[in-house]
């Protein structure tokens, strides 16, 4: 791969086009008002158009506009015909197709495969404004509208479906989105550099089918295609099998030296010995690695072999560090899907340049006063970084944004806070979040760039925090203090999820956070209390939680504030047993937590936990036919039970919990005192047990006053809830 150019080092495509439009045009009338007869690039998105850097179509559109390209937007088109895709005419260069900020299937369906009643990215939260698998549908309609136009797909949906992937909603392994969408090129990950380079090269007349050297791109090629003759292929199309057993020679065995020697006395010609320095050897190995493609199992193989699917997932994740990742290739029928190595992280000045672009910072005027929930959620928030090195197996952030943190500079962030203060309607002085994928990874990185580039770990913080990771939070503390000092800013809250295992390394940060940036409630995500599921999630144990909780409560008292931690948990995650969920329910009761909103695990494309769910093998280690089996809650009844354990206090869940406790031999937890998990009887008017469960009649009695939702209170006096399943 050629070294990437800086995002803002290209000459402008249209030097005379310098005045940015208030909004990118969404109609012919808006194009005419700008004096345009055509668009260079037309972006198709499944979201409402909001001109703000938190929304992909706006960020990409403004970035290309900065390069001198005319960019139009087709937002949430009616996909039942090709006509809406002709609304802005034929683009001069290409259609850029995205599903929006979310995968369309996750946007439209719950973890139980039920259609959601609202779409947070649509005006009025109206559902059904986008199709299932929107990238595929939109790309096909764009091709139908203009058959000879270039089609480029991107966004998180395309990124996470770039190879054969398990699709939870159809319960099968589907092909890469490339052959289904008929797109010319797929951009994955942080695609800004590839997008800008690609657009300039197409504008210069280079055919899209010849552009094969950009990082973060995927495309279809003939079987066996290689970029050059000196490329080699590493075959990894079968999962790991035990190697052959070598017979060691017996040191005491007597042999006839003459018979063992060569029959001829002729000595072989001496070969010259080439001595390389350590640096030269490393450079040679790196050069060889850079010209190696790894062939992963074909779609036709992984679709019918769940274990091979888990093996493929492991390869993909091991080849995700931009510093040492190799290209990947996967057969789909008679053709290959070729994936170049992932994009290199953006430099700080590039991040600043992207977020400093002239966004209108609001929804397009065509939506009037309609409420768009996603906009309401983020309009007073500031994104300070990208990426996450946590490596949680159920999360797809790493697969999309990468593990290396890409941070904005302090001045850029402070400028945006001032913009929110001055230009965002309805601002009252409170910044709702200063974060990103996580709250406290800003400016954190490996201590040594060379180590970072050669690292093959899947997480920097599991099973323990890497000794090479810089965990200094001082730059984030300094940012918080400067942000609070901006005139007109009354309060800055931290709404992003906190990595408390990192936070406890910096008491100064925890004190700063708790004293100034918590609005009464702080969300953190232990995800579970038991080692079994935690090990499959790659999450820390509860020791770090207790340490953070102690610091949080101490600093809250010192600040004279009554504040609470809100823990988040996942039910039915791969590797979770009924006993694990019972232990978690007992932990919640012992700590007086009554959770309101809870969720079951949702297998998302490309996540390692999804490979566990589908393949029932653990891709965190080498995968073979006899490797570790991961038991996974799959049936609706078990998933409902695991979710019910999280809401043990809800009368609707008591019948299924009673049945489960009796089956598990834990009838001792059924009763009407504090030491019991669920009451023996249903209260009047509450749902009764199913016809398959023992039915009991509830006497007329009070069932007690529930605790405040999601809040930790001092433990009640009286007998503690016993736990006879292995943990206390």
Image (cartoon, rainbow, N blue to C red):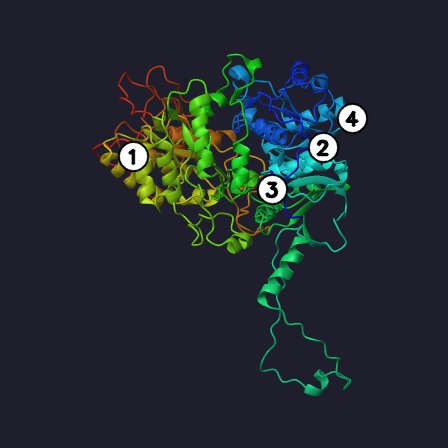
Disc 4 vs disc 3: Cβ atoms closer than 8 Å? no
> Residue 147 got which mark?
4
Question: In what element is the residue under mark 1?
Answer: helix
For residue 515, which numbered disc appears in the image? 1
Question: Where residue 352 appears, x then y in whole percent?
Answer: 51, 36
- For the residue pair 699 and 208, the one nearer the viewer reads as 208
The mark that comes first in sequence, 4 or 2, is 4
Answer left or right for 727 relative to 15: left
**Does residue 3 appear anywhere in the picture?**
yes
Q: CA distance from mark 1 to mark 4?
A: 59 Å
Q: Which residue is mark 3?
A: 6
Asked if the residue under mark 3 is in contact with the one under mark 1, i.e. CB atoms within 8 Å, the reply is no
User: Which residue is the site of mark 2?
Assistant: 183
Which is more foreground, mark 2 or mark 1? 1
Percent position of residue 463, x then y: 44, 50
The mark lying in front, picked from 1 and 4, is 1
User: Within the image, what quadrant is residue 107 found in?
Assistant: top right
Q: For the residue carrying disc 3, how many other residues have a C-alpha within 10 Å: few (<14), some (14-19), or many (20+)?
A: some
């Amino acid at each position: 791969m050629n070294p990437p150019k800086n995002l803002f080092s290209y000459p402008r495509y249209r030097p005379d086009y310098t005045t940015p439009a208030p909004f990118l045009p969404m109609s012919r009338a808006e194009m005419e008002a700008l004096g345009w007869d055509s668009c260079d690039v037309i972006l198709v998105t499944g979201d409402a158009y909001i001109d703000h850097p938190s929304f992909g179509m706006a960020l990409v559109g403004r970035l290309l506009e900065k390069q001198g390209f005319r960019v139009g937007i087709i937002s949430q088109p009616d996909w039942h015909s090709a006509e809406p895709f002709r609304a802005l005419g034929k683009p001069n260069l290409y259609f850029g197709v995205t599903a929006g900020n979310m995968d369309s299937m996750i946007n439209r369906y719950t973890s139980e495969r039920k259609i959601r009643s609202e779409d947070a990215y649509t005006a009025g939260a109206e559902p059904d404004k986008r199709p299932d698998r929107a990238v595929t549908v939109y790309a096909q309609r764009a091709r139908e509208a203009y058959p000879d136009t270039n089609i480029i797909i991107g966004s998180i949906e395309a990124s996470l479906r770039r190879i054969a992937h398990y699709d939870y909603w159809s319960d099968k392994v589907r092909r890469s989105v490339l052959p289904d969408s008929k797109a010319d090129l797929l951009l994955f990950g942080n695609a800004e550099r590839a997008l800008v380079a690609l657009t300039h090269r197409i504008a210069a007349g280079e055919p899209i089918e010849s552009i094969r050297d950009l990082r973060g791109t995927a495309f279809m090629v003939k079987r066996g295609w290689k970029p050059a003759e000196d490329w080699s292929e590493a075959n990894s199309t079968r999962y790991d099998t035990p190697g052959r057993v070598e017979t060691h020679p017996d040191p005491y065995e007597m042999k006839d030296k003459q018979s063992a020697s060569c029959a001829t006395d002729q000595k072989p010609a001496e070969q010259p010995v080439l001595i390389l320095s350590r640096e030269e050897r490393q450079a040679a190995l790196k050069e060889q690695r850079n010209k190696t493609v790894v062939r992963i199992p074909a779609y036709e193989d992984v679709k019918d072999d769940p274990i091979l699917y888990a093996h493929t997932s492991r390869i993909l994740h091991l080849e995700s560090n931009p510093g040492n990742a190799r290209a990947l290739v996967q057969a789909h029928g008679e053709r290959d899907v070729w994936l170049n190595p992932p994009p290199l992280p953006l430099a700080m000045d590039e991040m600043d340049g992207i977020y400093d672009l002239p966004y209108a910072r609001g929804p397009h005027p065509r939506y009037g006063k309609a409420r768009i929930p996603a906009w309401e959620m983020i309009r007073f928030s500031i994104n300070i970084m990208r990426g996450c090195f946590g490596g949680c197996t159920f999360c797809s952030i790493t697969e999309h944004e990468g593990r290396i943190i890409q941070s904005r500079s302090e001045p850029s962030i402070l400028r945006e806070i001032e913009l929110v203060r001055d230009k965002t309607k309805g601002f009252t002085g409170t910044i709702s979040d200063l974060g990103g994928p996580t709250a406290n990874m800003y400016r954190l990185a490996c201590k040594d760039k060379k180590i970072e580039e050669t690292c093959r770990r899947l997480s920097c913080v599991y099973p323990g925090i890497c000794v090479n990771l810089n965990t200094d939070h001082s730059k984030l503390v300094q940012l918080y203090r400067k942000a609070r000092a901006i005139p007109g800013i009354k309060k800055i809250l931290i709404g992003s999820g906190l990595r408390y295992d990192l936070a406890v390394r910096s008491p100064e940060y925890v004190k700063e956070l708790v004293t100034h940036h918590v609005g009464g409630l702080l969300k953190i995500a232990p995800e579970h209390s038991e080692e079994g599921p935690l090990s499959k999630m790659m999450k820390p144990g509860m020791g770090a939680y207790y340490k953070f909780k102690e610091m949080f409560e101490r600093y809250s008292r010192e600040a004279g504030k009554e504040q609470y931690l809100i823990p988040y948990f996942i039910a039915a995650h791969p590797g979770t047993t009924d006993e694990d969920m019972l232990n978690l329910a007992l932990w919640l009761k012992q700590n007086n937590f009554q959770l309101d909103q809870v969720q079951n695990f949702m297998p998302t494309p490309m996540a390692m936990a999804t490979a566990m769910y589908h393949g029932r093998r653990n891709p965190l280690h080498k995968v073979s036919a006899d490797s570790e089996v991961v038991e996974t809650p799959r049936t609706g009844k078990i998933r409902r039970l695991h979710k019910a354990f999280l809401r043990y206090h809800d009368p609707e869940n008591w019948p299924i919990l009673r049945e489960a406790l009796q089956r598990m031999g834990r009838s001792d937890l059924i009763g009407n005192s504090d030491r019991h998990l669920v009451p023996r009887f249903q209260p009047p008017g509450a749902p009764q047990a199913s016809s398959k469960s023992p039915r009991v009649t509830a006497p007329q009695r009070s069932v007690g006053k529930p605790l405040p939702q999601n809040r930790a209170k001092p433990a009640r006096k009286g007998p503690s809830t016993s736990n006879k399943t292995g943990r206390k």
